[in-house]
Amino acid sequence: MSNETKKTHRGSQNPIQTLKRLFSYMVKNYRWQLILVMIFILVSTYANVRGSLFLQVVIDDYITPLIGVKDPNFSGLLKAIITMAFIYGTGILANLFYNLLMVRISEGTQKLIRDDMFIHMEALSISYFDSNSDGDVMSHFTNDTDTLRQMISQSIPNLLAASVSFVSVFIAMFSISVPLTLVVIVSVGIMILTIRTIAGRSGRFFGAQQKSLGKVNGYIEEMMHGQKVVKIFNHEEKAIEEFTTMNEELRQNATQANKYANSLMPIMMNLLNIQYVLLAIIGGLFSVYGVSDLTIGMIASFLQLSRSLNMPISQVSQQINFVIMALAGAERIFKLIDERPEVDEGYVTLVNVVRTEDGFEESVARTGLWAWKHPHQDGSVTYTELTGDVQFEDVSFGYNANTRVLKDINLYGRPGEKIAFVGATGAGKTTITNLINRFYDIQEGKIRYDGINVKKIQKASLRRSLGIVLQDTHLFTGTIRENIRYGNLGASDDEVIEAARLANAQVFIENLPDKYDTFITGDGEGLSQGQRQLLAIARAAIANPPVMILDEATSSIDTRTEKHVQQGMDQLMKGRTVFVIAHRLSTIQNSDVIMVMDHGRIIERGTHDDLVAEKGMYYQLYTGKVELD
């Protein structure tokens, strides 16, 4: 295997650091439960070792003396058996209690990690989700956390118990027979070498298995969402071919990982059986030929201890692969948690204000009048009314350092103006809207909002002042009312109805079985694409922002519906700065400014009549001589 392949197939690259972080979750939140677990493990181990040692007493002191006696008295033997039963019973209860506690700890830790992942995921920038598939991100929340649950609830307590039992049993063995213990040490050394060799080989493939599983999940999700497109373009065979390739890669990695893992237990059990037979033979020879003062009870007790020693070794061999796989999953989880969150150095915030003689005064109550609260270095605070004045000054931007998508963009959107963008796919239209709401930050130039550099504005405040309707509508599981109210969680039922009326969605909503309380699932399953778009427009309307971004908002609506929507949109756009991206030129002819974009530059700007008169690119688009692709 090449070095590159080995690098690819490694499991956790830093298992010690990963374990430390994992234990920090457990110790921080379940310290006392972990202490109890350790106590119960010690009690369980003590009971197991004490029971094995007590076997010598039972045989040598109670059974052997009764051999050949005509009228034996079994009262002493009975008491000894009851004592052994009590010892083993205590061990069983301790074992039960620490396993129950570990279930509680594992489920709680899994919840905490999922909480941290989700909270951090919400803080990540859009660029992270643009570069990682949804299925792979989902795999962190499902497959990776499930491997952690198995490790915490089963592997960790078993390994702890095995470690304590291993040391305790060895001490007990030394107290019975040093020569036999040396035999055990040699055989254990062989077993540890075997475990290390096999686990090391399988561990390289468990990390690759988790990554392959994430890729498969991501591809399945893509195919599920795009199933109509797959069928329309007869892409089934190609989809099957690509899935088969990914699934085969997963099979190979999983096979390599589990091939060694599944062979470990049979090998270990046979080695343990060989050890047991050797100890019985050697112990018997020592006793028969008087090499040592071993009694039958001592040999029986030692053999029982060897069985007790076999159990932790077999537990380690069983759990080691689960630990390796869980650590690979944990490393993926912590990698997500360590992703750099969306940077926000803004300090200008959006607040409710009331107008006074001296300007504005901040208000706790919702007044319908908003202003930018701008603290200054000298301790003073100024308030600038939120009007929706947007300006781009020599803006250049690229999604990576080597390629510029926008070049030297200069534009302004005055309050109440409707600015439209037209141009071919990839011209940079949507990128401009992504920069207004700071999904991405520019490399050169400045964007000003009401005269304030947007980098000074907190992103949450900036986005609260913007309404956006995308080409791809996303609805959430819930009622129609809840989906509209998503734009303003504090909106009343009357405001929900008014927003639906503005978007002309009220007619179709009233015809639904439960009207506004109709429950929708699966991103609006059961609604037409046009109806989903109307709900998205209503959701933007209820937010009542001074700036609206319509990214081909009517592209999925038929011409008849578009007329009704346009009427609602015209009402919605009154007094607002509106940026419109549209393929249908009919929807933007009444715009105050139309900007024609090509390869990241604005090549024409003006009203519809001005641009037609210029007979440039817009004229060619309008007359059909050139079509938008």
Image (cartoon, rainbow, N blue to C red):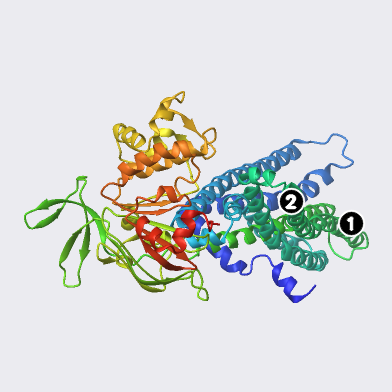
The local crowd at label 2, few if under 14, some if 14 to 19, many if 20 or more residues have their Cα within 10 Å, is: many
Q: Between residues 50 and 215, which one lies in front from this camera angle?
A: 215
Vertical arrangement, residue 408 with respect to residue 32, above or below: below
Residue 505 in percent (x, y) is at 40, 34
Q: Between residues 561 and 520, which one lies in front from this camera angle?
A: 561
Asked if one can make out residue 354 in the rendered structure from this viewpoint, the answer is yes
At mark 1, the secondary structure is helix
What number of labels is visible?
2
The local crowd at label 1, few if under 14, some if 14 to 19, many if 20 or more residues have their Cα within 10 Å, is: few
In-image side of 607 versus 225 (left or right): left
* Circle 2 residue: 52
Residue 254 in percent (x, y) is at 75, 56
- Could you tell me which quadrant the N terminus lies in? bottom right
- Could you tell me which quadrant the C terminus lies in? bottom right
In-image side of 542 versus 126 (left or right): left
Q: Given contact means CB atoms under 8 Å apart, are the residues at marks 1 and 2 in contact?
A: no
Q: Which mark is residue 556?
A: none
Asked if one can make out residue 341 in the rendered structure from this viewpoint, the answer is no
Q: Amino acid at mark 2?
A: Ser
Vertical arrangement, residue 323 with respect to residue 516, above or below: below
Image quarter of residue 507: top left
Q: Amino acid at mark 1?
A: Val
Residue 572 in percent (x, y) is at 31, 43
Of the two numbered discs 1 and 2 in the rendering, the one whose residue sits closer to the viewer: 1
Q: Residue at x 54, y 38 (%)?
A: 522
* Circle 1 residue: 277
Q: Residue at x 32, y 61 (%)?
A: 458
